[in-house]
Amino acid sequence: MKYGYKPAYSETKNRHQENALLAFLFVCGLSGLIIVQYHSQNASKTECKSSIYLPEPPSSAIAKADILAEKTATDTKPEVKGRLLSTSLQPEVYQPFTFKMLDYTEGILYELDLGNGDILPFKHGALQYTYRLSGPQTVTLYANYNNQRQKIDALPIQVARAVVVEEIAKVIDYSNPSQAINTPVE
């Protein structure tokens, strides 16, 4: 007699029930997809043939005309000029650096996004700033007018590390005998 594992009746019954449930869910899902596809294709073919017309009161039409006239009066934008001066000089950490603007329009508020989260206004086409960290930054020039903000120019820069000058050793000029004799040896 061979010995082997024979599943109990309840285990095979559970397997058949699980398989039947999975097959049922598959059929339901597939039929749902077919219905959705059918309705989306039919919805695109049919057009909306009914509309509701609500007449506007006369005061509303007048108000709209007033708003339109006011909007066209305030939409006359001044020509916004402005350009950052591109230079070979790069800012250095802990050293003040002056950004200069060319061709700017008086009466418009210009702001400079310094690339590190700080945004400062220009005054008379110049802005002085001291960076605290080195690395690449992109400075962006914005113009603000009529409660609108417009990007005017952007300039990539590299903020250099601070140059530290340290005396490594005292320099002795041996060509000058008086300095060589009077210099104590450490």
Image (tube, rainbow, N blue to C red):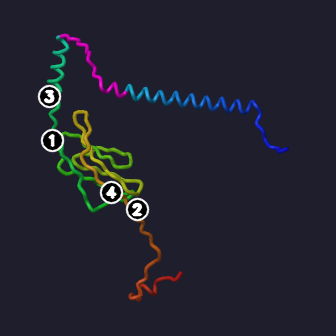
Q: Are marks 1 and 3 in contact (CB under 8 Å)?
A: no
Distance from label 1 to label 3 (Cα)?
Answer: 15 Å
* Image height of 168 relative to 131, above or below: below
Residues 179 and 110: in front is 110
* Image height of 120 relative to 100, above or below: above
Q: Which residue is mark 1?
A: 79
Q: Can you tell which mark lies on residue 73?
A: 3
Residues 45 and 85: in front is 45
Q: Quadrant of the N terminus?
A: top right
Helix, strand or loop under label 3: helix
Where residue 56 appears, x then y in whole percent? 20, 12
Q: Which image quarter: residue 92? A: bottom left
Is 162 left, or right, of 76 in this rendering? Answer: right
Q: Tell me what residue is drawn at x 29 percent, y 46 percent.
A: 112
Q: Amino acid at mark 2?
A: Ala
Helix, strand or loop under label 1: loop
Q: Amino acid at mark 1?
A: Glu
Q: Which image quarter: residue 170? A: bottom left
Q: Which residue is mark 2?
A: 162
Is 82 left, or right, of 13 in this rendering? Answer: left
Stretch in magenta: 40-57
Q: Quadrant of the C terminus?
A: bottom right
Is 103 left, or right, of 98 in this rendering? Answer: left
Q: Are marks 4 and 3 in contact (CB under 8 Å)?
A: no
Front of the two marks 1 and 2: 1
Mark 1 or mark 2, earlier in chain: 1
Distance from label 2 to label 4 (Cα)?
Answer: 15 Å
Where residue 138 appears, x then y in whole percent? 33, 52
